[in-house]
Image (cartoon, grey):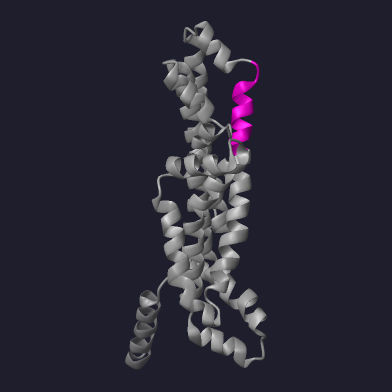
Amino acid sequence: MTAPDLDERLREEGAEAERPPPAVPQRRVTWQKLTVLPCFLIALLLGTWLWFQQADLDPISENALSGGQVSKALWQHIGLTVISTFFVLIIAIPLGVLLTRGSLRRATPFATAVANTGQAAPAIGLLALLVIWLGTGMKAALIGIIVYAVLPVLSNTVAGLEANDPTLLEAARGIGMSPMGVLTKVELPLAVPLILAGVRTALVLNVGTATLATFGGGGGLGVLITAGITNQRMPVLVLGSVLTVALALLVDWLASLAELLLRPRGLEAGR
């Protein structure tokens, strides 16, 4: 092998050595994401159940936990969370879209200030006012939860739509897409990560705020918590608190999975 050939071969080998390794595509959902939190929740609930097995329940505690009252409170809590989140989505996302259109942009600070006021007010005080106005029952509780959770979804929807690259929007219009096509096929898909983050926050807020529904006659796990506090029965209080924490963690985990699965594939690289 001649000297020039040797030099050329060395240069080629050096270039191959400097070449970065091919990118390994990241999994959208890892096994740790799928298993760690469920295993923790199972351990938490199992530990609570084992503690109850050896706990000495007096008649007051047994009366508070018997007759399917625990399952009833749990399903009421889930119902409050699901229904309130549904109404938050159908209110906050369309409103956020409208506030980024044309002349309605000028109303964005006002709408955000109103939403901030709803969340800044103490939840128990807001619920008390709604009970005075609407009476006791699930209706007042739902309205209070909805008002309290609108802000994260509304602000994230507006922020996500306003953060879109104007050149991409101009390119979409340049190829003849209608305003509705630009919104549904370009703007909203790009804003999905921020919108989903707001929805995730609202879900966890709703689970926590729903515990206050008991003060307005709305039921939920707050019934167990307040019964445990007022009657000074630790097992009842522990059960209500553990179920509320477990439900909040489960909802946050499911929302995080949805956030990963619904994220547009083109945006995964920046994650």
The residue shown at (61%, 38%) is 138
Question: If the image is split into quadrants, where does the N terminus sit?
Answer: bottom left
Residue 120 vertical position relative to residue 270 in the rendered view, above or below: above
Q: In the figure, residue 81 lies in which quadrant?
A: top right
Instruction: Confirm whether the magenta stretch covers residue 5.
Output: no
The residue shown at (51%, 59%) is 153
> 166 or 144, which is in the foreground?
144
Q: In the figure, residue 77 lies in which quadrant?
A: top right
The residue shown at (55%, 79%) is 101
- Outermost residue on the front side: it is 133
Visible in this render: residue 25? no
Residue 64 vertical position relative to residue 35 in the rendered view, above or below: above
The residue shown at (50%, 35%) is 211
Instruction: Confirm whether the magenta stretch covers residue 74.
Output: yes
**Lateral position of residue 141 relative to residue 112, left or right:** right
Image location (x, y in percent) of residue 230: 43, 20
Residue 150 vertical position relative to residue 19 in the rendered view, above or below: above
Number of callouts: 0
> 199 or 94, which is in the foreground?
94
Image location (x, y in percent) of residue 41: 50, 33
Question: If the image is split into quadrants, where does the C terminus sit?
Answer: bottom left
Visible in this render: residue 98? yes
Image location (x, y in percent) of residue 112: 45, 65
In the image, the segment drawn in magenta is: 67-78
> 172 or 72, which is in the foreground?
72
> 148 or 16, which is in the foreground?
148
**Lateral position of residue 165 relative to residue 189, left or right:** left
Image location (x, y in percent) of residue 264: 58, 67
What kind of secondary structure does the magenta stretch mostly adopt?
A: helix
